[in-house]
Image (cartoon, helix red, strand yellow):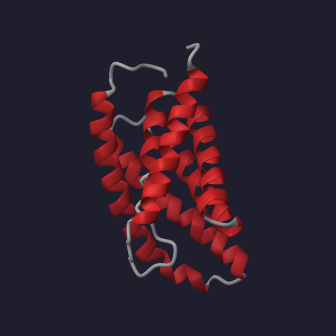
Amino acid sequence: MKNRAAYFGVFTALALIFSYVETLIPVNLGIQGAKLGLANLVTVTVLYKTDFKEALLLSVTRVVLAGFIFGNLFGILYSLAGAVLSLVVMNCLKPRSSLSVIGVSIAGGASHNLGQLIVAMIVVETYHVGYYLPVLLIAGVITGALIGIVCREALKRIRNITNV
């Protein structure tokens, strides 16, 4: 489609807006850096409406830009690890007819937190932060389910847009 760059720009802007809105929502899950993952709504939607490469480019662009605007270098590192692992897992699970977009999003949320935890273990050079894994997995499942539900409804409403 000739407007691919325009669609990419719109989706990137939307993901950045969601990232900003997320900074305004006071969520205290008792876990440093825990977020709702609103911008992942755009990533999951793009993964379902286009392909893996487009979703990966969007995700990396969003993480880097949001990190420079709202965060720091370590935030970019953690978010990038989580975003890439999450996207790879979701892309592998997406073709399975037994999983809905909600199930795929749940797996993405859990794997996002796992990716961040792996980076944290490397950065702090200890596996002790791994004790957060159960709490992070629960948080990832809950936020992944919420994002999946919203994404399912969004995909219903934009079903006429194919291969943006």
In percent of width and height, residue 18 lies at 45, 51
Front in this rendered view, residue 80 or 111: 80
The quadrant the N terminus occupies is top right
In percent of width and height, residue 30 lies at 41, 82
Q: Is residue 56 left or right of residue 155?
A: right
Residue 91, placed above or below residue 4: below
Residue 36, placed above or below residue 134: above
Front in this rendered view, residue 68 or 56: 68
Q: Is residue 89 left or right of residue 67?
A: left
In percent of width and height, residue 62 lies at 59, 47
Please give the name of the residue rendered at 33% of the width and 18% of the height, measured from the top-left corner.
160
Single out the residue that lies furthest toward the top: 2
Residue 14 seen in the current view: yes
Residue 93 seen in the current view: no
Q: Is residue 143 left or right of residue 112?
A: left
Please give the name of the residue rendered at 42% of the width and 64% of the height, measured from the top-left corner.
24
Residue 93: image quadrant is: top left
Counting the numbered discs, the total is: 0
Residue 14, placed above or below residue 141: above
Residue 56, placed above or below residue 164: below
Please give the name of the residue rendered at 56% of the width and 31% of the height, measured from the top-left corner.
8
